Amino acid sequence: MKDRLTEIGFAAGWRLVRMLPLPAARALFNAGADRAYKKNGRGVQRLRRNLQQVDPGLPEPVVRDGLRSYARYWLEAFRLPSLNKQQCLDGFGISDEHYDWLRKGAADGNGVVLALPHIGNWDAAAAWVVSNGWPMVTVAERLKPEAVYQQFVAYRETLGMEVVPLTGGPRPPLDVLAERLGQGWIVCLLGDRDLSRSGVEVSFFGGKTRMPAGPAILAIRTGAPLYAVDLSFTPTQTYAVLRRIVPPTEGPLDQRVKATTQLLADAYAAGIAEHPQDWHMLQKLWL
């Protein structure tokens, strides 16, 4: 029964939120975030602890702002399928230099690996990539219930991207992603939380955690350029900053993967420190 209610809730979100006028939807989602903040449940407490790890001196209102930012992510995610190509382009900001990095990577046929933490609106970033005419592929965690996972796959495929299952697919996901890079695709991966329990241990804001090895392995294996992506919210856009990550070329593979993943962690930290309220990490992260 709980799984069925979860399925219905997500389905209703994608249908009903798009019907509301945007100001009314924003007010509704902000009110929900403020209510969650006042209830101070486990997710809110975890967000507070995570933000304190980022900076013990952060003021308490950042936690409330973080919940509002997370609510904005969901609001925009529910409304994304109703946007046209131009609206997806207009709702996203990036410097001309960083845009050229992506354009060149796609045009050269080497592909691009984009790795990012759970920050800002990563679905808006994906919709922007696709709206530029660049083919994009990502990996999806198999959520429970299965019907919710299928909803998320359908949602992201509606935005124009290919979705590869993290587990249970006909081929290993890294093989599919490497093949797509060889075809000039852009690979977009969330990289700040390890879902396999066998990730690479890194130092992150003074503590130890594990992050997935996939982005580093792909970049080393294929030679595709690797960028850490920092996303933040402005009043009207999701704004992106890219940080180039250059994997070491000498030494055993496992050491190169570990060093590259640490470089990614450092790049994530630089962006999160600049706008911690947009980092949506409500799960346990540090070991």
Image: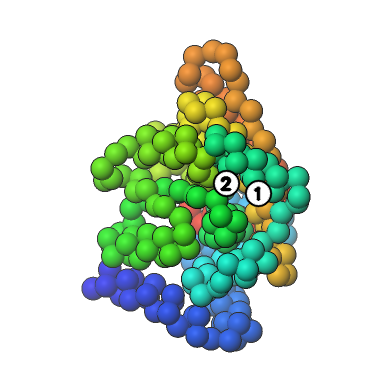
Residue denoted by label 1: 230
| Residue 280 on image: x %, y % | 56, 57
| Residue 188 on image: x %, y % | 51, 46
**As rendered, which of 67 and 186 lies closer to the eye?**
186
As measured in the structure, the alpha-carbon distance from the residue carrying label 1 to the one carrying label 2 is: 7 Å
| Residue 242 on image: x %, y % | 68, 44
Please determine whether, in this image, residue 220 is positioned above or below residue 121. Answer: above
Residue 101 is tagged as none
Residue at the spot 47% in from the left edge and 59% down from the top edge = 160
Q: Mark 2 belongs to which amino acid?
A: Leu
Please determine whether, in this image, residue 207 is positioned above or below residue 155. Answer: above
Residue at the spot 39% in from the left edge and 72% down from the top edge = 10
Residue at the farthest left position? 1
Left or right, 167 with reference to 88: left
Residue at the spot 48% in from the left edge and 26% down from the top edge = 221
Residue at the farthest top position? 251
Residue at the spot 53% in from the left edge and 70% down from the top edge = 80
Please determine whether, in this image, residue 223 is positioned above or below residue 177. Answer: above
Q: If you read the primary sequence from the N terminus, does the residue marked by circle 1 or circle 2 appear first?
A: 2
Residue denoted by label 2: 116
| Residue 16 on image: x %, y % | 45, 83
Q: Mark 1 belongs to which amino acid?
A: Asp
